[in-house]
Image (spheres, helix red, strand yellow):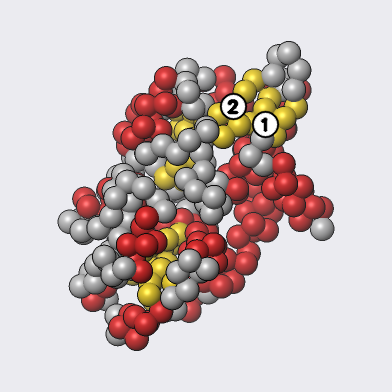
Amino acid sequence: MKIFMYLAISLLLWPTWVKANENTETIITNPANSAQDSRFEYPMLLLQEALERTVDRFGPYKIQQYPTPVSRQRALVKLMNGEITVFDAATRQEWETAALPIRIPLRKGLQGYRLFLIRSEDQKKFNQINTLDDLLRFRMGGGQQWSTTLALKRLNIDVIGGNAYEPLFKMLIQNRFDYFPRGVNEAFREKEEHENIYPNLRVEENLALYMPLPTYFFISPLKPKLAKRIEIGLLSMIEDGTFEKIFSTYHQRDLKKANLSARKILKIQNLNLSNETPLDKAELWYQP
């Protein structure tokens, strides 16, 4: 019950969490890309808890969202110059080189299990898919700067789309592409957030596409002390089980709906991972 109360209170306070005095550090994080965009609620819960645990050692803080949407490329520029100080994103080698990655998969790799948003009338077509080759006969949509898209393109898989998040839902409904792969943590929420606008939006019932895809906190290279602080907080949460409790509580509804063990999971490589990806630490990864 305590963890549920914590989550509820934290969500009411997000996106600005303040413990302020004259020495307060302001932490600027991901902007929302639309009024419907709830993708950053969960990492903000982790960030809040990591910072809260380290107040005695590092001092007070406040968290604010960057005020306007930014593309993935612009986000990295702003991270490098300190306009954004903490950014939650799926990893890629460019980011690991230019920023300070905390190599703890925030969603335990859950975002690497991709379910498909489709048009309701197309479910029968997707029922016929048995292999990756079958799937790739259909047109895939996605953001052109997303880490998943770059990984797919390195496998010579074509992805149709643009740089903006919200128009992709309209493109799907308008038959510009056939399916929109979304993380387990995203698909059902996005379907619910958009069904009033696009009533024939549906989460495909039988398939999942999997690639190893850790999401990290990336810290501005101008803020090494902040990177150390957040890492210490996250490791403390893993050690006492709080990290797992927050993960399980926040994602339990989506995991139940996804029912991954009953789906046909098509696996592909992620050639964008660095050699420092902690793939050998099974405790950091979700296992269906």
**Are dots 2 and 1 in contact, CB under 8 Å?**
yes
- What residue type is disc 1 on? Leu
Mark number displayed over residue 236: none
Residue on which disc 1 sits = 51
Q: Position of residue 251 (x, y in %)?
A: 60, 60
* Residue with the most extreme right position: 1
> Could you tell me which residue is drawn at 36 percent across and 32 percent down?
74
> Could you tell me which residue is drawn at 67 percent across and 31 percent down?
51
Q: Nearer the viewer, residue 200 or 211?
A: 200
Q: Nearer the viewer, residue 177 or 226?
A: 177
Calculate the distance from the C-alpha at mark 2 to the C-alpha at mark 1: 10 Å
Q: Position of residue 78 (x, y in %)?
A: 42, 26
- What residue type is disc 2 on? Ile
Q: Residues within 10 Å of mark 2 (few under 14, many from 20)?
A: some
Nearest to viewer (mark 2 / mark 1) = 2
Mark number displayed over residue 27: 2
Badge 2 or badge 1: first in the primary sequence: 2
Relative to 267, 32 lies left or right: right
* Residue with the most extreme left position: 156
Callout 1: helix, strand or loop?
A: helix
Q: Quadrant of residue 247?
A: bottom right
Callout 2: helix, strand or loop?
A: strand
Residue 61 visible in the displayed image: yes
Residue 275 visible in the displayed image: no
